[in-house]
Image (cartoon, grey):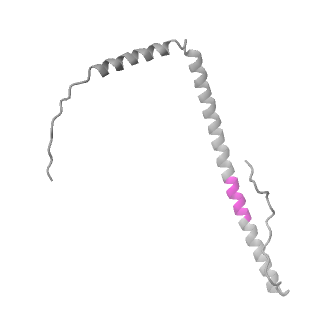
Amino acid sequence: MRSPFPRKTIRPKLTAMPRQQSEATAYLRVYQLVVEKQRLQQELQTIESRRQQICQRLDVLDKDIAEAEDVARQLRTNTPSNQQTPALAEGARSQLQKDAANPPENNFETVVLEY
């Protein structure tokens, strides 16, 4: 699935006023670039780790799907016909009707608890 927004390049942070050129500003710039590089490397490692997790989960899902399809295929080939299902349903329905016609006796015992 793609993001609805196009990817943009990561731009460096800009300051309102340019600094005067000196050795300190040069080292500051080097430091900022090194920090950004480390941050991006860490982000890349995190993304790679997440990618591996997703790939592993996809492999597990593929195996589960294949097993479920095999079970469905076996059940389809092992079922002799669909004629037994209505007969079982009729038997269960008649048993429910008999149970409804003859309700069980109510043998309740009363227990009183006082607080």
- Most distant residue in the front direction: 101
Query: Residue reaching furthest right?
Result: 21
State whether residue 10 is above or below residue 31.
above
On the image, the x and y values in percent for residue 78 come to 56, 15
**Residue drawn at 62 percent across, 27 percent down:** 69
Q: How many marks?
A: 0
Q: Position of residue 79 (x, y in %)?
A: 55, 15
Report which quarter residue 68 is drawn in: top right
**Residue at the image point whose x is 63% and y is 34% from the top:** 63
- Extent of the magenta region: 40-49
User: In the figure, is residue 108 to the left or right of 75?
Assistant: left
The image quadrant of residue 104 is top left
- Residue 111 is situated, as x and y percent measured from the top left of the image, at 15, 41
Residue at horizontal 49 percent and vertical 13 percent from the top = 84
Q: Position of residue 42 (x, y in %)?
A: 70, 62
- The foreground one among 77 and 91 is 91
> Is 72 on the left or on the right of 44, as rendered?
left
Residue 45 shown in magenta: yes
Residue 109 appears in which quarter of the rendering?
A: top left
Q: Is residue 57 left or right of residue 83?
A: right
Q: Nearer the viewer, residue 93 or 10?
A: 93
Q: Main secondary structure of the magenta part?
A: helix
Q: Is residue 111 left or right of residue 66?
A: left
Task: Name the residue at 78% across, 74% down.
Answer: 13
Q: Determine whether 38 is above or below 93 in the image.
A: below
